[in-house]
Amino acid sequence: MLKSKIGAGLISFVFVIGAWQLVIWIGGYQEALLPSPLAVGRAIFSLIEDGTLFAHLQVSLFRFFIGYITAVLTGIILGLILGRTPKVWAVADPIVQVLRPVAPVAWTPFIVLWFGIGNIPAIAIIFIAAFFPVLLTTVSAVRKVPDNYLKTAINLEIRGPTLLWKVIFPASFPSIANGLHIAVGTAWIFLVAGEMVGAQSGLGYLIIDSRNALDLDFVVAGIVFIGLLGLALDKGVGSIERAILKQWGGVY
C-alpha cells in the first residue's frame, strides 16, 4: 500500500515537471517570464543552503499553529455550546452567516492598524480563516447527534459539561473532523496572503519579496514549498483524526 502511494506520487511529480517543461518549450517562454524546473531547483537548493527557507518556514509554522489551534479550540467549544442551545444559535446564526463570507484579508487594514506589523496580524487572519469552518461544522454535528445517545446519557445521570465531553463530542467528532480539514486548507491559504501584506518574514513575505526583486525562480520555489507544506499539514490532521478515533474504539 505504501509502495503504491509512493509510486503514484513519483508519477505525479514526473508528470508535473514534464508538463511544466513542455509548456516552456511550446510557448518559448524566457526565464524572466516562466522559470524552468531546473532554475527553480537551483533556487530551492539555494534557499536550503543559506538557511533562508528554514528561517521563513519556522516563522510561518509558528503563526499557523498558534492561529489554527486557537481557532479549533474556540470553534469546537462554542460549537458544542451553541449546538446544544438552539435559541441562542438562532440569534447567533445570522451574525455568523454575515461575517463568514468576508475574506479574512479584508480585515487586514484594521488588524495592521490595531496590532502593527509582525506575528499578530498573520495569526489573527489564520484564526478568522479557520474559526468559521470549525464552528459551523461543530454546530451542525452536535445537532445531528442521535437522540438515543442523549437519552441513554440522561438515564445514566450524565449531564452538563460531562455530557458534552463524554457523549456529544465523541459522537459528533467524525463530522467535526471534516471541518478541521477544511480549516487547515483555508487557514494555510490565508496565512500566505496575510504574510504578503502584514509581515516582514514568512513564506508569504518570501514570495512577495522575490516578486519585487523579479526573482521569479524564488517565487515558484516558495509556491512549491507552500503546496508541499499544505499537503503535509492536511495529512497530519488526518493522522490525528485517526488516532482519536482509534482511542475511542473506532465506533463513531
Image (cartoon, rainbow, N blue to C red):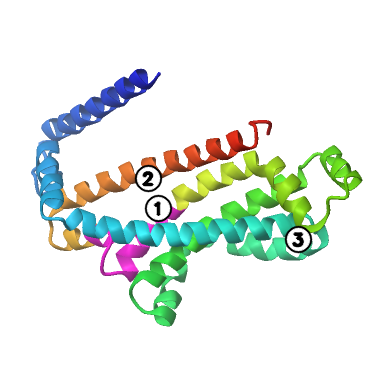
Q: Is residue 121 left or right of residue 141?
A: left
Tell me the crowding category of disc 1: few under 14, some 14 to 19, or many 20 or more residues within 10 angstroms, Cα based: some
At label 3, counting other C-alpha atoms closer than 10 Å, the crowd grade (few under 14, some 14-19, many 20 or more) is: some
* Amino acid marked by disc 1: Ile
Q: Amino acid at mark 3?
A: Trp
- Looking at this view, is 231 or 196 the one in front? 231
- Taking 131 as reference, is 43 above or below it? above
Residue 33: tell me if it is visible: no
Residue 22, by quadrant, is top left
Q: Residue at x 12, y 45 (%)?
A: 45
Q: Where residue 91 appears, x then y in whole percent?
A: 76, 65
Residue at screen point 31% across, 69% down: 199
The residue that mark 1 highlights is: 189
> In the image, what residue type sits under mark 2?
Gly
Q: In the rendering, at what x and y percent does residue 125 appear?
A: 45, 64
Q: Provide the residue span drawn in magenta.
A: 187-206
Residue 154 located within the stretch drawn in magenta: no
- The secondary structure that most of the magenta stretch takes on is helix
Which residue position holds label 3?
A: 89
Q: Nearer the viewer, residue 104 or 69?
A: 69
Residue 124 percent location from the top left of the image: 46, 67
Tell which tag, 2 or 1, sits nearer the viewer: 2
Residue 230: image tag: 2
Task: Please count the marks in the image.
Answer: 3
